[in-house]
Amino acid sequence: MGCDIHFFRERFTSDNNYSGPRDISEDRNTRIEQIIDNSPVTKRWVAADLWELIDDDYWSCYEAYSERNYYVFSILADVRNSSFNGTGYVDPLDYPRGIPEDASSAYIYYTNKWSGDGHSHSYFTLKELLEVDWSEYDQEYIKNFLNVVEDLKSIDPDTNNVRICFFFDN
C-alpha cells in the first residue's frame, strides 16, 4: 500500500477574504471585536489554497503538492525514510510536530475528514523552509517540491506569514 501526502498552504492575516471551510463563530467574534474595539481584526491563519464547495457540506481543495515522493516525505517528517533508489536514509528537517494549535478552520476541516486515517501531521513556515540547505539533498528527487516552495513566496512577502501544513495517509 502506498503513502500519500495531503498538503495545504496557509497565510497569517487579518483579511477575511479567503475561500474554504470557515468557522462562522470565529469569523463573527473577530468582526464583533473589531467593531467594539474599533481596531483591526486579529491576525490568524487562514487557507491560502483554492477551495470549492461541492455540495452543502462537502468542500474540496486543490493541493499545491500531491506527488508521492518518499524522499520528500522523509525530509519533511521522517515518513517512509529508508533507501530510495540508492539514496539511503536522510536526516529529516524535523519529526512530525502535530496539527498546529492555531491551524486554519479549513485545515482542521480536512484533517477531521480523514479522522484516524491521517498520520504524521506537521507544518513549517516558509521562513523555515527557506533556511534549509537544500543542496544537501538529491536535487533530482526534490525539484518539484522546491518549485512549490518557490511559489509560496507569492502568498506574502513576510516569510513568517506563510506556512505549509501536511499529513500522510496509507
Image (spheres, rainbow, N blue to C red):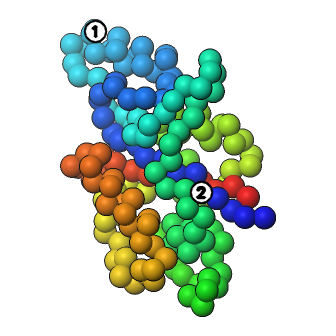
Measured along the vertical axis of the image, is residue 81 above or below residue 42?
below
The residue identified by callout 2 is 5
In this view of the protein, which residue sits in the foreground, 128 or 55? 55
* Residue 60 falls left or right of residue 160: right
Between discs 1 and 2, the one toward the N terminus = 2
Measured along the vertical axis of the image, is residue 170 above or below residue 90?
above
The residue identified by callout 1 is 36
Q: Residues within 10 Å of mark 2 (few under 14, many from 20)?
A: many
Measured along the vertical axis of the image, is residue 84 above or below residue 42?
below
Residue at 46% x, 21% y: name it: 26
User: Marks 1 and 2: CB-CB under 8 Å?
Assistant: no
* Residue 150 falls left or right of residue 27: left
Q: Position of residue 167 (x, y in %)?
A: 60, 54
Element type where label 2 sits in the image: strand
* Residue 31 falls left or right of residue 137: left
Element type where label 1 sits in the image: helix
Report if residue 95 is visible in the image: no
Q: Residues within 10 Å of mark 1 (few under 14, many from 20)?
A: few
Q: Quadrant of residue 137?
A: bottom left
Q: Quadrant of residue 2?
A: bottom right
Report if residue 80 is visible in the image: yes
Q: What amino acid does circle 2 point to? A: Ile
Q: CA distance from mark 1 to mark 2?
A: 42 Å
Residue at 42% x, 14% y: name it: 28
